[in-house]
Image (spheres, rainbow, N blue to C red):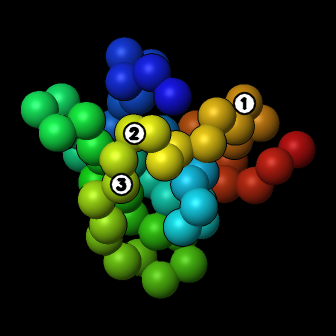
């Protein structure tokens, strides 16, 4: 996923599950994600994010 497409508050998917971006670290090419299920915070490398066009703001489920 390209860093320029990431914004705070957007939903992303990784091998760790679905979460909301709460911070973007451009220096280390990572994002801080709050997981949907347990609200735990995790730093995830941009390369580990899965491009998922069906997952969008305003909806935490696929359509």
- Nearer-N-terminus badge (1/3): 3
Q: Do the residues labelled 3 and 2 touch (CB within 8 Å)?
A: yes
Residue shown at 46% from the left, 68% from the top: 35
Q: Which residue lies furthest to the left in this view?
A: 27
What residue is disc 3 on? Answer: 44
Up the image or down, 23 lies above or below 41; here it is above
Structural distance between the alpha carbons of marks 2 and 1: 16 Å
Residue nearer the viewer, 50 or 38: 50
- Nearer-N-terminus badge (2/1): 2
Judge left or right: residue 21 versus residue 13.
Answer: left
SS of the residue under disc 3: strand
For the C terminus, give its image quadrant. top right
Q: Which mark is residue 46?
A: 2
SS of the residue under disc 1: loop
SS of the residue under disc 2: helix
Q: How crowded is mark 1: few (under 14 residues within 10 Å), some or many (20 or more)?
A: few
Residue nearer the viewer, 9 or 5: 5
Q: Position of residue 12 (x, y in %)?
A: 54, 46
What residue is disc 1 on? Answer: 53
């Amino acid at each position: 996923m390209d860093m320029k497409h990431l914004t705070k508050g957007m939903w992303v998917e990784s091998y760790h599950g679905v979460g909301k971006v709460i911070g973007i670290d451009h220096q280390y090419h990572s994002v801080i994600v709050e997981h949907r299920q347990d609200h735990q915070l995790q730093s995830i490398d941009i390369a580990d994010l899965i491009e998922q066009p069906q997952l969008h703001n305003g909806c935490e489920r696929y359509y």
